[in-house]
Amino acid sequence: MVRKKVVVIGSGPGGSAFAAMMARAGHKVTLLEKNGFPGGKCSSLPVGEYVADTGVHMFGRGPMGPFGQVARIVGEGPAWSRTLPSFTVRLSGKGNMDMYPSMFHPYSALSLAKAGMRGWFKQNMPRNVWRALSNHGAGGMLGMIRKMADPRVPLYSELQDATVEDFLTSMVASEDMLRMMHAQCMITTVLPWDRASAGEFMYILSSTMRARYLCYPRGGSGEIPASFLRAMIRNGGELRLGCEAASILVEGERARGVVTREGETIPADLVVSNAGVKRTVEMAGRDNFPEQYTARVDSLKESEAFIAVKFFLDRKVSSMRTPCMMHIPDLPPQSMFDYLEDGSIPSDLFLFVTVPSAWDPMLAPPGKDLLIVGVPAPSDLGRVEQCVGLLDLAERIAVEVFPEIRGHVVDKQRTHIAHTAHLTGRPTGECIGLGQEVGQSGTLKPLPATPVAGLYLVGSDAGGRGIGTENAAESALYLFGLLK
């Protein structure tokens, strides 16, 4: 093996995983992170006696997915915590359903049946079956079920050009089921269903249910990149925090290194950017890329955002039995997320709520809890005022859903798209990176290799498939396979 000098820009899940694997393979790795802490949007920071994620996280496959693969390669990874049941679905104004990772698990099926008997959740199975058979036929439905159960077949590529909305409404007649599936689409792709790719969504759904391991890392979400970076350092890699890459040095049509904000040039045989494809093109200089490539990059769209209110409590949360809740608004499924386009504040909101200290009690002092209330939001930085209004509504709903927190909030943080943009250095407050939407997902997603020799992308912008952080880890595994 020829030992290469590798400079990695950004320490998110993709950058940290790739850097750790390359160091383990014997290469000389230097990782640059603009912030004074690692992880980017997948990080955890101390807030007094608490430890709070910068985002709102639960992880679909944990050690059973790409994070586990990386950990086995580098010899270190996070310890995972999971609970059964795994999450709660709250039907606004009606009641709660506790669920296992698979909707087909007997416990989940029983919860759905009980909600149906109470009139909370109408499945309308005869109408669903009739609609599915009318649109796809018996053979088509059987073939689809077989392909969903087998990850080796190309169902997800077949569906990459269909929207989640078109795919689901061709099979499901129940408004309640469509409402829950639209919410599931938003939480996993951070896109409304009229933009999200059905191939991406169905891959996420089926792989998560196969893994049956909804979980959270002990120590907070930041422990994922932190554990990989410990492995990188142990194998001779260098981590430089508070060191921002200002530009990528390109000479003779090849990437030769990175220039830091302080003006230092770090030479490299390979430059791997976790900064996103658009930011990478700017750092390397647009003139170094073919016009066709830059035009394609300019046309790509980012995911929407997730903003949050974080409540630091002097008591335990007692209103739910699981560490995670999806609050489903009592709104028509087709219009649940119209506010992302029209700039309004809706009457009710979809909320993704986590209690990280229920997964890992060490994240809060004894007898206390951390409650994080996440809200889908537009990623455009011109929409900060709307984000503030959405957080105001989210706080009001949170107090209604969790009345026990009244008078027990010792501290509170509100984070929105401006905070995310500052964290990442990108011009939007997007949650994932490029949106997993029709026209730019699956086989149409940018490749890790750029037209500039020696310059590669890692992370969700050039990833495989999966929920954002797992998408980034899949990208790291793919690129490592190419370059090791």
Image (cartoon, rainbow, N blue to C red):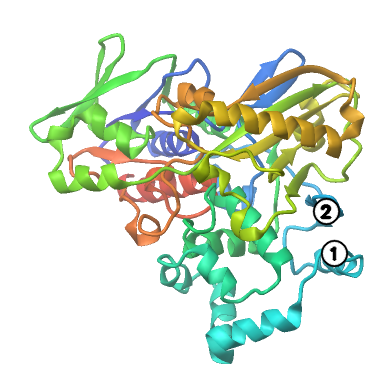
- Residue placed most toward the observer, 136 or 72: 136
Residue 168 vertical position relative to residue 70 in the rendered view, above or below: below
Locate the C terminus and report the quarter of the image it occupies: top left
At 53% from the left and 19% from the top, the residue drawn is: 37
- Crowding at dot 2, Cα within 10 Å, few <14 / some 14-19 / many 20+, comes out as some
Residue 208 is at least partly visible in this image: no
Q: Amino acid at mark 1?
A: Tyr
Instruction: Report which quarter residue 240 is drawn in.
Output: top left
Question: Quick check: can you spot residue 16?
Answer: yes
Residue picked out by circle 1: 107
Instruction: Give the residue drawn at x 43%, y 53%.
Output: 464
- Mark 2 lies on residue: 85
When the figure is inspected, residue 96 is found, relative to residue 219, above or below; the finding is below
Earlier along the polypeptide chain: callout 2 or callout 1? 2
Along the line of sight, the residue nearer the viewer: 154 or 281: 281
User: In the rendered image, which quarter is residue 134 located in?
Assistant: bottom right
Q: What's the residue type where badge 2 is placed? A: Pro
Q: Give residue 125's position: percent from left, percent from top.
A: 75, 79
